[in-house]
């Protein structure tokens, strides 16, 4: 669901309107004082109008600035509305996002994608919880890695540890390590989270896509597509002790 968007726009408009109202009140007071002084001035020693002229110019400049601010705030409100509409288009889509951190719901699964740098011969992986504890690990030859049509490998985890017990709900991270034929680590392996967008929510004034329970900033989306065949979770080949 989308919440808070209209409140943000309303608050911006209220700020500009309050400034305009305050200026109008001050200007009315200024005119009242000016009229009073003109009525009561000494005809033989008329007042110097330059000071009042300067104040009139200042009021005019402030009024122009407030009008400019109101126009800018209106434009910002329109942009926010357009961005909200664009984000709603993600609902019902599967997205890949920059962070390798995903949320695991109770009894649920978690999904990632990754790619490997050239020269990779062996792939090692770890799934760790938010405390850094390894809940699942494994390895496999790079030749056995199945890549998708976009050149990335899909990973589906059924939310269980090495003993087959369900892990607690929370944030989990997939870590991928690529090694060459000599067992040396190769930099360049990249992991993205994946999730199904269920809603768009505004949290502390910031919009997030809620993808399979994970809060994703829209600018971190790296791919979006219609739901397809999500890979079935497979038991990884456990590392030998």
Image (cartoon, rainbow, N blue to C red):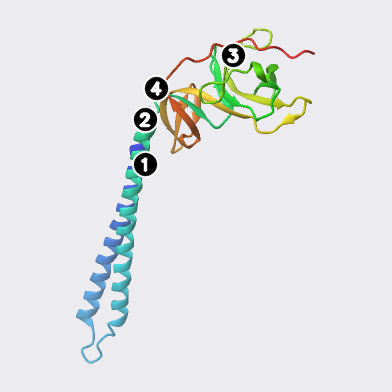
Q: Position of residue 232 (x, y in %)?
A: 54, 11
Q: Choose mark 1 or mark 4, whichever is in front.
A: 4
Q: Which residue is mark 2?
A: 88
Element type at marker 1? helix
Q: Is residue 32 left or right of residue 127?
A: left
Q: Which residue is mark 4?
A: 92
Q: On the rendered image, what quadrant is the C terminus found in?
A: top right
Element type at marker 3? loop
Element type at marker 2? helix
The local crowd at label 2, few if under 14, some if 14 to 19, many if 20 or more residues have their Cα within 10 Å, is some
Q: Position of residue 42 (x, y in %)?
A: 23, 87
Of callouts 2 and 1, which one flags the residue occurring earlier in the amino acid sequence? 1
Cα gap from disc 4 to disc 3, whole angstroms = 23 Å
Of callouts 3 and 2, which one flags the residue occurring earlier in the amino acid sequence? 2
Q: Position of residue 223 (x, y in %)?
A: 47, 30
Mark carried by residue 80: 1
Element type at marker 4? loop
Cα gap from disc 1 to disc 4, whole angstroms = 21 Å
């Amino acid at each position: 669901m989308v919440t808070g968007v209209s409140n943000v726009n309303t608050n911006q408009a209220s700020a500009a309107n309050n400034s305009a109202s305050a200026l109008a009140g001050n200007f009315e007071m200024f005119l009242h004082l000016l009229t009073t002084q003109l009525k009561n001035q000494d005809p033989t020693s008329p007042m110097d109008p330059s000071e009042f002229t300067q104040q009139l110019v200042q009021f005019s400049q402030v009024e122009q600035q407030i009008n400019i601010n109101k126009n800018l705030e209106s434009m910002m409100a329109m942009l926010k509305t357009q961005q909200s509409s664009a984000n709603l288009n993600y609902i019902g889509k599967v997205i890949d996002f920059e962070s390798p951190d995903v949320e695991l719901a109770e009894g649920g699964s978690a999904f990632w994608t990754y790619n490997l740098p050239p020269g990779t011969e062996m792939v090692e992986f770890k799934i760790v919880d938010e405390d850094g504890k390894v809940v699942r690990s494994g390895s496999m030859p790079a030749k056995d890695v199945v890549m998708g049509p976009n050149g990335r490998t899909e990973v589906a985890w059924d939310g269980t540890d090495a003993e087959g017990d369900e892990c607690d709900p929370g944030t989990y991270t997939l870590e991928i390590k690529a090694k060459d034929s000599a067992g040396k680590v190769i930099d360049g392996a990249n992991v993205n989270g994946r999730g199904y967008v269920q809603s768009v929510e505004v949290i502390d004034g910031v919009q997030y896509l809620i993808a399979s329970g994970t809060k994703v900033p829209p600018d971190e989306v790296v791919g979006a597509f219609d739901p397809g065949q999500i890979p079935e979770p497979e038991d990884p080949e456990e590392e030998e002790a």
